[in-house]
C-alpha cells in the first residue's frame, strides 16, 4: 500500500481546505449571516475531520470535531460570528494546520497545551458540555433533526488498498454521523485461493445508517477516496436499489469496474456528468516532476537549435524545411510546458487579507485590503519566492503608511485606511504594486537619519527620489524603537535583494502627502526559458531579453566617431545613453569597422548597447551562473547555443542602473547639484544642448 502517497494527498487537500477556511472566515466578517459562506466554512472543517479519521489521526479528529460543533451552531443561527469568535476560529484554523502536519498522534504532544487552551475558549460556543463525547452523543450534537434509516451500498475498487485507502476507516467515520444499525460485508467477489492477491480488495459493504444527515454529508465521507469507491445510496423511505453485484456473476463487478465510471444513485445524469467533468479538469502534479519536464524542454530547445544550425550549414533545402518545422513544434511545446507552471497571483494576494487584519488589530488601526488584477498569471516558482517580500511590504504599509483613525480624521480622511495590491502584465513582464493611502514618506526625517548615519553629507542636495531611495539602504530606519512591525526601512534592502535575485526590480513611486506611497515590483513571467536576441562582441556572444529590445540600428561612421568621445548619442532627437559592451566586460580585441546599437528599454528608461554583430532572435534556456561568476554585475545567467558555445544573458536592469550611477559620478566630479536632471534618463532634455 502506498500510504506515503495517500498521506501526501491528504496533506495537500487539507492545506487547500484550511486556506479556504481562512478566506471564508474573513469574508464572513464583512458578509455576516450569509448561509452559503457558513455552509462552505463548515464543510472545510468537516472534510478535514473526515479525511483525518480515515488515517486514524485522532489528534486531528478530536480537535476538529469541537470546531465543527461550533460551526454547526453558527450555520444553524444559534450563535453569531462576533469579532472575538472570528479571532478564535482563525487561531483554531492555525492550530489545525499544525496538527495535520503531524503524521502520528503520539508526535503531537507538544501541541496539546495550545490545543487544550483553544478548546477551553471554544467551550462557551458549544451546544453540549465537553464531557459528552461518546459516539452517540456526537451524533446527537451534530444532528438535531429527525433521524431516518439510510441504506448505503459500497463497492471498493481492487486498487484501493494499494492507494492507501482503509475501507474500515470509512465505516468508522460513517458511525460518527449517526448509529450504524447493520454492516454486512459482501464477499461475493472473492477469487479462488490461487488467484488471490493480498494487496487487492475484493470486499463490499451494505450499511444501514440511522441518522438525520443529508445525502451530501454521506457523500462527503467518501470525497477523499475519489474514484476508488462506488456508492449506491437509498434515502429514508425510498425503495431499495438493485444490488450492484449480480448473483449470477459475482466475481466480475469489482474487477471490471472502471475507475472513472463512478455513478451515484438518485443523482441526475447532468449532475453526474458535471462531477466527472470537475474531476478531470484538475490533475495534481508533483512540483519536481513539472520542474524536470521544464528542464527537458530546455534541453530540447538547445537540441533543436543544433539541428537548425546543422541544416543551414548543409545547404539542403529539405533539411532546412524540416528544421524549421521542428523549431515551430518545439516552440509550441515550450509555451505549453511553461503554461503548466503559470498560476493566478490572486491566491497569493488573498493570503494578505489575514496579514492586514492581524496587523491592523495589533496596531489599533482600521485597514482594508483592496485587490485588483488577481487573475494575472505568473510562474509558480516566482509566486512562491515573491511571497516573503510582499509580506514585508504589506506589513510596512499597514505600520508606517496608514495613519491611526484619529489622525486620519484630523486630516479629513476616512477613518478606515486602505492598502492596495495590484498586478498586471507589461512588456513581457509582470508588475506588482503595493500602495497605501497614508501620508507618504517624510523627506526631512529621512534626510536627518541619513546624515546621522553618515550616508550623505549635511550639505548634500538630493532629489526627492534619491531621498526616498535611502530606505533601501541596509538597516536604514526612522523609528526610535524597533518592534516586530516597526521600520519601513528595516529589511527593505533584503526585499530589494530578493526581488533582484528573481531578475526583477523594485522602485518607489508616487510618494506624497496626498497620494500615500507605492512600491512597484517588476518581475519576469518565468525563470526558465525566454525569447532572446543574440549579439556578438569580439569572440563573445551575448543574449538580450527580447521583450526589452526596442530596435536595432547600425552606427554610421560619423556616429561611431562621436560616440567614441561621449557616452550618449542623439538618436532621432532623443538622448540615448550608451554602454560599450566591449569595454564594460573587458572583451579583448579591437572593434570592427562596423558597429551596431541595440536599443533597450526597462521601466521607462532607454539605453543603447554597442555591439559588433547582430545575430537575430534565439530561444534561450536560462542556466544559472556558477558561484565564482555570480558576483558579476550586468549578467543574469548563461545559455548554451546550438553550436555548443556558451552565451551570457545580459541583465538590462542592472546595466541601466549603472548608467545612472555613472552619470551621477560624472555630475559630482563637475561640482554639479545632486538634484539636477540626469541626462538621457529624464524626459524633456534638449539633445542639442552641450554637456
Image (cartoon, helix red, strand yellow):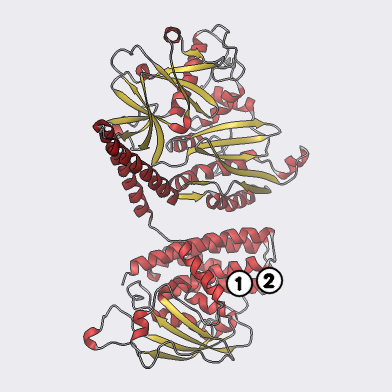
Quarter that holds the C terminus: top right
How far is mark 2 from mark 1, CA to CA? 8 Å
Give me the residue at 25% from left, 84% from top.
Answer: 196
Q: Vertical placement of 678 versus 625: above or below?
A: above
Q: Is residue 377 left or right of residue 125?
A: left
Q: Residues within 10 Å of mark 1 (few under 14, many from 20)?
A: many
Residue positioned 48% across, 74% down in the render: 50
State whether residue 100 is above or below residue 565: below
Instruction: Give 610 or 76, whichever is nearer the viewer.
Output: 610
Mark 2, Cα crowd under 10 Å, few <14 / some 14-19 / many 20+, is some
Q: Residue furthest front?
A: 317
Q: Residue 155: give x, y in percent of width and height.
A: 41, 82
Please name the residue that numbered disc 2 is placed on: 79
x and y percent of residue 73 in the render? 64, 74
128, 259: nearer the viewer = 259
Q: Quadrant of the N terminus?
A: bottom left
Amino acid at each position: 500500500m502506498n500510504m506515503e502517497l495517500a498521506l501526501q494527498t491528504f496533506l495537500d487537500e487539507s492545506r487547500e481546505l484550511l486556506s479556504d477556511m481562512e478566506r471564508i472566515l474573513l469574508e464572513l466578517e464583512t458578509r455576516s449571516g450569509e448561509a452559503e459562506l457558513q455552509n462552505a466554512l463548515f464543510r472545510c472543517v468537516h472534510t478535514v475531520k473526515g479525511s483525518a479519521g480515515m488515517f486514524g489521526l485522532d489528534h486531528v479528529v478530536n480537535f476538529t470535531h469541537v470546531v465543527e460543533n461550533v460551526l454547526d451552531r453558527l450555520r444553524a443561527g444559534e450563535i453569531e460570528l462576533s469579532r472575538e469568535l472570528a479571532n478564535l476560529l482563525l487561531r483554531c484554523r492555525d492550530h489545525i494546520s499544525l496538527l495535520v502536519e503531524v503524521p502520528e498522534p503520539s508526535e503531537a504532544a507538544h501541541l496539546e497545551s495550545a490545543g487544550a487552551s483553544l478548546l477551553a475558549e471554544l467551550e462557551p460556543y458549544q451546544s453540549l458540555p465537553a464531557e459528552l463525547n461518546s459516539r452517540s452523543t456526537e451524533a446527537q450534537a451534530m444532528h438535531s433533526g429527525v433521524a431516518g434509516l439510510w441504506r448505503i451500498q459500497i463497492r471498493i475498487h481492487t486498487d484501493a488498498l494499494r492507494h492507501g485507502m482503509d475501507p474500515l476507516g470509512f465505516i468508522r467515520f460513517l458511525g460518527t454521523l449517526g448509529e450504524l444499525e447493520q454492516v454486512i460485508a459482501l464477499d461475493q467477489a472473492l477469487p479462488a485461493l490461487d488467484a488471490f492477491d493480498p494487496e487487492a480488495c475484493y470486499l463490499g459493504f451494505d450499511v444501514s445508517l440511522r441518522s438525520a444527515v443529508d445525502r451530501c454529508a454521506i457523500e462527503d465521507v467518501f470525497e477523499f477516496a475519489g474514484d476508488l469507491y462506488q456508492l449506491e445510496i437509498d434515502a429514508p423511505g425510498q425503495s431499495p436499489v438493485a444490488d450492484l453485484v449480480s448473483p449470477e456473476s459475482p466475481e466480475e463487478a469489482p474487477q471490471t469496474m472502471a475507475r472513472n465510471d463512478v455513478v451515484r444513485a438518485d443523482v441526475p445524469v447532468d449532475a453526474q456528468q458535471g462531477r466527472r467533468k470537475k474531476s478531470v479538469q484538475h490533475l495534481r502534479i508533483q512540483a519536481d516532476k513539472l520542474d524536470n519536464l521544464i528542464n527537458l524542454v530546455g534541453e530540447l530547445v538547445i537540441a533543436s537549435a543544433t539541428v537548425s544550425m546543422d541544416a543551414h550549414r548543409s545547404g539542403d533545402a529539405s533539411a532546412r524545411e524540416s528544421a524549421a518545422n521542428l523549431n515551430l513544434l518545439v516552440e509550441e511545446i515550450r509555451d505549453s510546458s511553461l503554461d503548466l507552471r503559470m498560476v493566478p497571483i490572486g491566491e497569493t494576494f488573498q493570503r494578505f487579507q489575514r496579514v492586514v487584519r492581524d496587523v491592523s488589530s495589533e496596531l489599533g488601526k482600521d485597514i482594508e485590503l483592496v485587490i485588483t488584477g488577481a487573475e494575472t498569471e505568473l510562474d509558480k516558482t516566482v509566486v512562491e519566492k515573491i511571497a516573503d517580500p510582499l509580506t514585508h511590504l504589506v506589513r510596512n504599509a499597514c505600520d508606517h503608511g496608514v495613519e491611526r483613525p484619529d489622525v486620519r480624521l484630523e486630516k479629513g480622511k476616512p477613518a478606515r485606511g486602505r492598502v492596495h495590491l495590484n498586478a498586471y502584465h507589461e512588456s513581457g513582464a509582470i508588475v506588482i504594486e503595493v500602495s497605501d493611502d497614508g501620508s507618504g514618506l517624510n523627506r526631512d526625517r529621512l534626510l536627518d537619519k541619513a546624515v546621522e548615519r553618515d550616508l550623505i553629507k549635511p550639505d548634500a542636495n538630493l532629489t526627492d527620489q534619491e531621498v526616498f531611495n535611502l530606505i533601501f539602504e541596509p538597516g536604514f530606519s526612522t523609528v526610535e524603537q524597533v518592534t516586530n512591525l516597526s521600520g519601513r526601512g528595516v529589511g527593505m534592502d533584503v526585499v530589494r535583494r530578493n526581488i533582484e535575485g528573481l531578475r526583477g526590480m523594485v522602485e518607489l513611486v508616487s510618494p506624497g502627502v496626498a497620494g500615500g506611497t507605492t512600491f512597484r515590483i517588476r518581475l519576469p513571467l518565468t525563470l526558465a526559458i525566454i525569447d532572446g536576441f543574440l549579439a556578438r562582441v569580439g569572440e563573445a556572444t551575448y543574449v538580450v531579453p527580447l521583450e526589452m529590445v526596442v530596435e536595432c540600428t547600425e552606427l554610421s561612421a560619423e556616429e561611431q566617431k562621436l560616440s567614441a568621445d561621449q557616452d550618449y548619442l542623439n538618436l532621432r532627437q532623443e538622448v540615448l545613453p550608451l554602454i560599450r559592451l566591449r569595454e564594460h566586460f573587458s572583451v579583448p580585441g579591437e572593434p570592427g569597422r562596423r558597429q551596431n546599437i541595440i536599443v533597450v528599454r526597462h521601466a521607462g528608461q532607454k539605453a543603447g548597447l554597442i555591439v559588433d554583430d547582430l545575430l537575430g532572435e534565439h530561444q534561450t534556456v536560462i542556466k544559472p551562473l556558477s558561484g565564482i561568476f555570480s558576483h558579476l554585475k550586468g549578467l543574469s545567467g548563461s545559455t548554451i547555443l546550438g553550436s555548443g558555445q556558451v552565451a551570457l544573458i545580459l541583465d538590462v536592469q542592472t546595466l541601466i542602473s549603472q548608467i545612472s550611477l555613472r552619470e551621477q559620478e560624472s555630475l559630482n566630479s563637475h561640482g554639479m547639484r545632486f538634484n539636477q536632471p540626469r541626462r538621457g534618463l529624464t524626459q524633456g532634455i534638449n539633445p542639442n544642448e552641450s554637456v
